[in-house]
Image (tube, grey):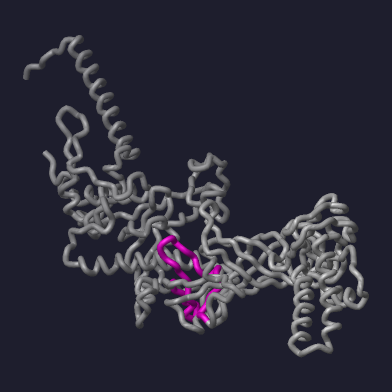
Amino acid sequence: MKHETLHPSSRVRDAGGATLRAILWALAGAAVALFLIADPLGVSPVDGWLGLSHGGAATAATAAPAVKPKEHTQLWTCGMHPQVIQDHPGNCPICGMKLVPLRGQKAGGTTAGQRTAKAAKGSTRKILFYRNPMDPTITSPVPRKDNMGMDYVPVYADEASSGQSGAAPANQGAVVTIDPAVEQNMNVVTEKVIRRDITRQIRTVGSLDYDQEKIVSVTTKYAGFVEKTYVNYIGQPVKKGQPLFEIYSPKLVQTEQELLSARRYAGRMSGASPEAAERAKSLLQAARERLGYWDITPDQIARLEKSGRVFRTLKVFAPSSGVVMTRMEGLDGMAVRPGMELLKIANLSDLWVTAEVFSGQLPWVRIGSPARIKLTYFPGKTFKARVRYIEPEVSEKTRTIRLTLEVPNPQRRLRAGMYATVLFEPVVAKQAVTVPSEAVFRTGERNVVVVSLGKGRFAPRDVALGPEGDGFVTVLAGLNEGDEVVTSAQFLIDSESNLKEAIQKMIAARAASSNHPEERSDEGSPPASKRLTGTRAASSNHPEERSDEGSPGAERSDAEGRHVARMAGGDHPEKRSDEGSPTERTGAKGGGK
């Protein structure tokens, strides 16, 4: 046997190569171990490989590993926006306020989504799907979170079908059932629908003025001279029959002489023939009537005939009681002409109130309508008035109509020029079906009330409204006498009813399209049955789409899908290349080289 003798340099080269290969293999093994343990791409979880090695090949539908819930030491939320929840302190992204610790969150505890899922799983109620808490039109067949981190709310079959049994009015929304304790916490207040008279209060302002029908002007029907006056200032009260001034008039003196002559002639002709005596009497009567036409009183005429002498001046008396409104300046000694206004007297037993109302209020104000007058000059005092006159046209500038009211003033306490508040309270509807005004909330196009159906059940209902007043509104259609309506917290009940109505419509749409399984319940989000099948594993070359971009629940679902896809490809073990580098993982592709 021949032995080869190796050169010492060859031994050195062989030893160095072996050391280099050992170092390379160690580095490659460390890189593979780090890659498998850290799993930065989320494609090869170690527990999945362990499941394959111990349990054999598993299908995508049955061998999906349970994802260990992430432990949270403390959650932080915003005091103004409770939907903002983070696992670390910071500022609210909406308002910028500092986040505060979430109370009741223990270390190592479950998240709100996990608690909801556990409660739903342990309940005997059937869950149809889960909905977005902010937008009920976004649904999911599995529990998840929205883009703000809020958990989806489960929708149960009994909730979706509540309010659908029995005949309900066409104008009624979905029925909402409220626990008595919750109803008390919400401060739900109800009131019966009854019949009553509806009065509408019309408030306006006005000013007091003299009664135009009780203002008189003092004039003379003859020319003359004022020699003595008894009224010396404006505002002086006078009574009917009180002398105002004395006047001298040549025509009056001449007429007085004619009266006295006719009287003497009639006395001489009393024993003559009947025709002559009658003619003398007619002359006497004509002289009396002439003085009467000049506003000489019968007492003055009788005194003139009785005295038998001519009076140089005659007194002019007040035609009515009242106060002097105007007086001619320098009345003493003034020469007057027929028709000259010497004095003006106003009677204050009644005053007029001039007010204005809008044209839309005119149907409730008529001639003779009663009103109440209040003045700041007399606190707590109310005066009664009545509409006397309504102008026939509307003011082009103010679009109002002027009214004239008559108010009695027996004690003469009211004065012209005072400002007053005028209140009308006409009955706009008699024995009408009414509800409190606060029970109705108006959306602009609809008028809605929330009706109590008994046993904690409530439902919104559209109504047609009529005249409103005195804190109540008339209901023309939609309610009957005896119904019970909610006057407090109705906004919360209506919003919940709208939410349930939207859910019921979605369930009906799902039932109508049940023959088309390819339709998705959440726009842009594939159903869970498609995400967790072996078909997904066979087509893993296509990246998974997220149903809710940026939501933690969607990322977790995609990671589970990739995990299952990895397990579905367990029949194709990974191989290493001859160069010593880690081979590509081809389990998700269905095979390897």
Q: Quadrant of residue 383?
A: bottom right
Q: Quadrant of residue 497?
A: bottom left
Residue 8 on image: x %, y %: 20, 10
Give the mark count: 0
Residue at the farthest left position: 1
**Magenta extent:** 432-460
The residue positioned 77% from the left and 64% from the top of the image is 346
Q: Nearer the viewer, residue 35 or 17?
A: 35
Q: Nearer the viewer, residue 562 or 134?
A: 134
Image quarter where the N terminus lies is top left
49 left or right, relative to 466: left
> Does the magenta portion include 383?
no
Residue 18 seen: yes
Q: Quadrant of residue 341?
A: bottom right
Q: Main secondary structure of the magenta part?
A: strand
381 w.r.t. 112: above or below: below
The residue positioned 14% from the left and 46% from the top of the image is 590
40 w.r.t. 280: above or below: above
159 w.r.t. 142: above or below: below
563 left or right, relative to 164: left
Residue 308 on image: x %, y %: 91, 74
Residue 184 seen: no
215 left or right, relative to 268: left
> Does the magenta portion include 457?
yes
Residue 355 on image: x %, y %: 64, 61
Q: Nearer the viewer, residue 387 or 486?
A: 387
Residue 11 on image: x %, y %: 20, 14
Q: Nearer the viewer, residue 127 or 290?
A: 290
Image quarter where the C terminus lies is top left
